[in-house]
Image (spheres, rainbow, N blue to C red):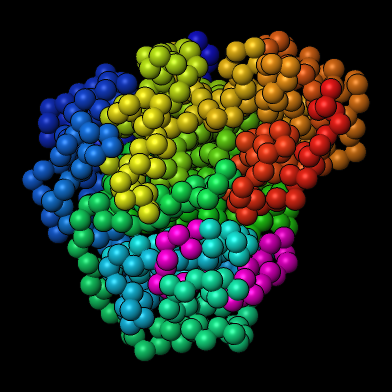
Amino acid sequence: MTEPLWTPSPDRIRDANLTRYLTALGDRHGLEFADYAALHRWSVENREAFWVSVWDFCGIVAETRGETVLADGEKMPGARWFPDARLNFAENLLRHRDGGPAIFFRGEDRVRGTVSRAELYDLVSHLARAFEAAGVAEGDRVAGYLPNVPEAIAAMLAAASIGAVWSSCSPDFGVNGMLDRFGQIEPKLLITTDGYTYNGKPIDSLGRVREALERLPSVESAIVVPYLDDDPDLDGLPIAKTLRDAIAPYPAGEIEFRQLPFAHPLYILFSSGTTGTPKCIVHGAGGTLLQHLKEHILHTDVRPGDRVFYATTLGWMMWNWLASTLAAGATALLYEGSVSHPGMDALFDFADESGMTHFGTSAKYIDAVKKSGLAPRESHDLGPLRAMMSTGSPLVPESFDFVYSSIKRDLCLSSISGGTDIVSCFVLGNPTAPVRRGEIQAFGLGMDVRVYDDGGRPVTGEKGELVCARPFPAMPVKFWNDPDGARYRGAYFERFPDVWCHGDYAEITEHGGTVIYGRSDAVLNPGGVRIGTAEIYRQVEQLDEIEEGLAIGQDWDGDVRVVLFVRLAPGCELDGALEDRIRDRVRRGASPRHVPARIVAVPDIPRTKSGKIVELAVRSIVHGEAVRNIEALANPEALDHFRAREELAE
């Protein structure tokens, strides 16, 4: 058994919210648990009691919870949680209305600001009245084409307060990418900024908005938040007003939070869309709120007054996850722009400046910091920092080592995994348990997480499909424009009937932790042996010459062969000696089956707007197939580097 990299001190365990929760269960119900595994078993075997206990412990504000906790509880999909409850999502996030900070904002090195809880409440009040005056009603869609600014959270809360449905994408999406998303859901109102900055450069948004609105007839009004210019030019946007003008007629006051059903649509999130038109995934207000509070308070140990950060855009579900920390009494830390501008230490500067307690980022960012040679524990204070979260791709064991050696030793490093599909996590942190190298600490409470082999049997210590065997409140309400539910069922329930199959290739360890090896649809299959791409990346990306890798399976001679593309570090060349080192590293660190048959250098690797590499798109290009939705990519021009490669023709 591997030794932990970090073990919480007795004081950390005593003070954790999870410990307080266990005490509450003991006091109220006489329950005691030998360890986290026992608590988790109870939470999935006694679902109704568990979710009621979370509701009570987290103090959810509601007109009524109703008598019924779960109806049709064995249907998956089809289970209905708290069917008689009435609540409002925004009311729960705005429950603290004082002079304390709700949002601390930084836009690269040019903009800084703080929004108090009272100021946020008032802005939401202004906007809710302006939305209603513009004809936005319960069930209508409000779309945000916005950078990660405080007004985005305020607009989302204003929509939620009146029962409208919020959807967003980041302004680096082009016109077609925006239309692929918003065109399906037909928003009534669009809110945007005049532009944004990236790497210190101002980038206009209004040109794209003008073009998009000509093709979005459902939009009846638009609001422009000044960001680049205090008085943006709205010429050619007859339905648009600046934020100042839009809210001027509507003084701030008490918000009339509409009390809505638990499953009332709150968000429409979009799948990445790299294999076709993005799926429009509808999430309910109650399930999102309950799941996020559980994750923030119990799994991430967010306490009133904490300062929580996640490096995200409005095109990634981590923005929605971050916004919900307001309900736990925390300050949401927003960073807009390039995470490496003006230098690789920008986010660590932000951590010190803001008093950050929880640092959320991607696995790729941690690897980039490591390769840059930065050692934040030597250059920054990071005194208040208690937790670091990582998601977006598997966090390799060597990155665990780097966090503890070069960022901070006394830190709960929580690799987390879930996604847009559930706007939350299946596996994540446990602040009262050790952190082990390369492992995600815990199954989410109330989530019946398992790994199935190909025959649908639960396995431990073997690789297989990550599944959830029982319904949970954060399951999507539906897909948009899917009246009979066929697309919804097809997305998650075809592989194993009545069981959510998430599409991750994973393994449960002997400690009850989880290792993710990549997406199941990107798993390689040479000679009939399934190989997760993350197993190859872990080995290759430890070489100083390699910045990043991408592996696919190429159909070849009646079988599949592994092809590895590498983006080299500056000044490096892929020669025979480096190829030999790569193959030797993969053979020794993984297995002979993992060794790539072909290694090809490319100048760039395509990725989604949220930073995930797109193996399937590259596989399609290599096989001469069309990539149907390049608008989903942050750098679609990178695909050209993979077309008709001579190295792959023999």
Q: As rendered, which of 413 and 588 lies closer to the eye?
A: 588
Q: Position of residue 223 (x, y in %)?
A: 48, 78
Q: Is residue 638 visible?
A: yes
Residue 426: give x, y in percent of width and height: 40, 33
Name above or below for residue 575 compared with residue 103: above
Instruction: Please state the extent of the stretch shown in magenta in the rendering.
Output: 181-210
Eyeballing the image, is 459 above or below 630? above
Using residue 621 as the reference point, say whether residue 477 is left or right of it: left
Q: Nearer the viewer, residue 484 or 590?
A: 484
What residue is at 60 percent from the left and 87 percent from the top? 235
Q: Nearer the viewer, residue 445 or 636?
A: 636
Task: Tell me, yes or no, whether the highlighted magenta stretch contains residue 184.
Answer: yes
Looking at the picture, tell me which residue is in the foreground, 33 or 281.
281
How many numbered discs?
0
Q: Is residue 299 above or below residue 525?
A: below
Q: Is residue 603 left or right of residue 594?
A: right
* 192 left or right of 198 in image: left
Residue 516 shows in this picture? no
Report the side of 319 relative to 565 (left or right). Answer: left
| Quarter of the figure that contains the C terminus | top right
**Residue closest to the far bottom:** 249
Give percent across and percent down for residue 170: 56, 60
Write the residue at 49% across / 47% down.
271
**Residue lying at 52% horizontally and 50% vertically, measured from the top left:** 277
The verdict on residue 616 being magenta is no
Residue farthest along the left direction in this orientation = 67
At 74% from the left edge and 25% from the top edge, which residue is drawn? 563
Using the image, determine if residue 231 lies above or below residue 547: below
Q: Position of residue 280 (x, y in %)?
A: 43, 52
